[in-house]
Image (cartoon, helix red, strand yellow):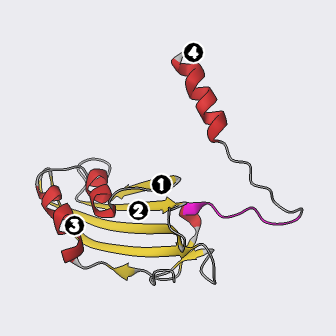
Amino acid sequence: MSKLAWCKAAAVAATAVVPIAVGAAPPALLPNLAVASRKIVSPVEYREASTFAASGSAPVDIALKVAGTFEGSMQHIIQVNNASEAPSASEITVIRDGLLDDSVRSERWEISLERRVPGIWEIKEVRRAWRCWRGAERERFVAVRCP
């Protein structure tokens, strides 16, 4: 099978069909889900990622170091820089869904980075939110971890 044919087959296999009731609105895309509140993460919790950032790592690599190992079915990574060329600030959002947890369905990390020296990023702030499998917080992210 050619590489192109394999990619097309993989894309078809990855397409999910979600049944929607007649007249119902389609479900919101994961990056568009409401965020009711966020928890500010203590720098102590991402100390290792801060050291990694100081070694000259790329913004997305730093964000993934903060978020840790991914164990779920889907991950979105969104990077927004303050400039196209030589940005001095970057906001990375990592959204993970289908987690292997009986209470937490999704987690959302928001990592704010600032470049102080060319090639060296510093973590300015990390915020985190969760979405639950059951209960009132199934359709939005909140600052309190699911019960």
The earlier-in-sequence mark between 3 and 1 is 1
Q: Residue at x 19, y 50 (%)?
A: 57
Q: Which of marks 4 and 3 is in front?
A: 4
| Residue 122 part of the magenta-drawn span | no
What amino acid type is highlighted by mark number 1? His
Residue 123's disc is 3
Indicate the secondary structure of the residue bearing disc 1.
strand
Residue 28 on the magenta span: yes
Q: Do the residues labelled 1 and 2 touch (CB within 8 Å)?
A: yes
On the image, the x and y values in percent for residue 103 come to 54, 74
- According to the picture, the residue beneath numbered tag 4 turns out to be 1
* Residue linked to disc 1: 76
- Look at 48% across and 54% down and name the residue there: 75
Q: Distance between the residues labelled 4 and 1?
A: 29 Å
Give the alpha-carbon distance from disc 3 to disc 2, as whole Å: 13 Å
- Residue 50 at x, y percent in the picture: 17, 64
Decide: few, some or many residues near mark 2? Use Cα within 10 Å; few <14, some 14-19, many ≥20.
Answer: many
Q: Which residue type does callout 4 highlight?
A: Met
- Which is more foreground, mark 4 or mark 1? 4
Q: Distance between the residues labelled 3 and 1?
A: 20 Å
Q: Distance between the residues labelled 4 and 2?
A: 36 Å
Which residues lie in the magenta part?
23-30
Q: Is the magenta stretch mostly helix, strand or loop?
A: loop
Q: Quadrant of the N terminus?
A: top right
Which is nearer the N-term, disc 4 or disc 2? Answer: 4
Q: What element carries label 4?
A: loop
Q: In terms of image quadrants, where is residue 78?
A: bottom left
Relative to 80, 16 lies left or right: right
